[in-house]
Image: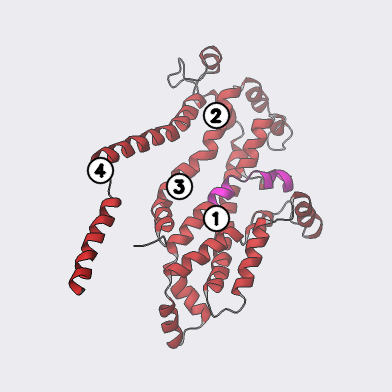
Amino acid sequence: MTNAKSNSRPVKRRHHLRLNQLGPAQSSLLSVFLIVLAVMTVAPVVLIAIISFSDKMSLGMYGYSFTPTKWSLAAYQGLWEFNDLMVNAYLMTVFYAISSTIFSLFFTSMISFAMAQKKFPIRKGLAFYIYFSGVLSGGLVPTFILFTRYLQMNNTIWIFILPTMVGGFNAIIMRTFMQRNIPEEMIEAATIDGANDWTIYWRLALPLSTAGLATIGLFLVVGKWNDWATGRLYISNPRLVPIMTLLQNIQTTIDFYKNNTLAKDTPDAIRALRDMPTESTRMAITMLAILPLLIAYPFFQRYFIKGMVVGSVKG
């Protein structure tokens, strides 16, 4: 009986490997599918970049094309007339993204570490509260009244940092990540050696959660970078406007620049507004919005992939 059981295990193992292996034809089809998917993803970005450098007359006559008849820098030259606003908005957005991400990762990881500990008596209640509050929010109008009338965070940098200090969805993900990747035996050994909860969190939990923190950090940075609604609702000071809000204002109405104290009453700005090509300017605005993320993503890719696969089902 023992020999029969021992002989059946390699058979099951080989059968399991055959089920998880792709044949040459299947591998080729999968490669073709992934190549087509990659082309479909990259092609719109390339087309947007080409249109942003196209002449407005050629766009009007021949439409969108990967090979325009005439190239032009008019869209970027028109936007360059307001470089002071653009540079300031970029700097403020970088500050908002980095500061809010650091604060959010710090407090979210602390709450997740507490919920991941079985000895924490209210961990289930806290997890339910965070999940429930993340699913059912107060709504736009109560939130606006709270932030502007009672907390008075409008026209301050704190409107971009404090409301996103802890994310319920991110806290649940980080709790699961810590439960799967930080062995309880390791925490018990650190406790026996005299380490308190803060030492275990700072010296043990955080180093072992680098991949998860990087993944959530990427989500936070992208979300904060693409956030235009916060600046539109709560910011009227042009010096505090983030880049996405500024680009949204440009796209919806060029009059935003005319009424701004940094651009009004300048002949170059008025001439640029009159001669600015519409379609290529929209695409140039899109490129200015996504280019920093395209440059930053490769640096996070390694941690992002690791954070997505670590903690998955193993077998």
Q: Outermost residue toward the right?
A: 149
- What amino acid does circle 3 point to? Ala
Give the residue at mark 3: 296
Give x and y (percent) for residue 297: 44, 47
Tag in front: 1 or 4: 4
User: Is label 2 in a helix, a strand or a loop?
Assistant: helix
Q: Earlier in the sequence, mark 1 or mark 2?
A: 1
Assess whether residue 170 is covered by the magenta stretch.
no
Give the vertical position of 252 relative to 297 (above or below): above
- At horizontal 59% and vertical 36% (from top left) the residue drawn is 83
Say whether marks 3 and 2 touch (CB < 8 Å): no
Contact (Cβ within 8 Å) of mark 1 with mark 4: no
Q: Disc 4 and disc 3: Cα gap in Å?
A: 36 Å
Residue 102: image quadrant is bottom right
Image coords of residue 252 (percent x, y)? 68, 31
- Residue appearing at x 67%, y 35% in the figure: 249
Q: Is residue 258 left or right of residue 168?
A: right
Estimate how packed mark 3 is, as few (under 14), some (14 to 19) or many (20 or more) residues with alpha carbons within 10 Å: few
Q: Mark number for residue 23?
A: 4
Disc 4 to disc 2, C-alpha distance: 43 Å
Main secondary-structure element of the magenta-colored stretch: helix
Q: Kindly indicate whether the residue at mark 2 contacts the one at mark 4 (C-beta within 8 angstroms).
A: no
Near-viewer residue (202 or 87):
202
Mark nearer the N terminus (4 vs 3): 4
Q: CA distance from mark 1 to mark 2?
A: 26 Å
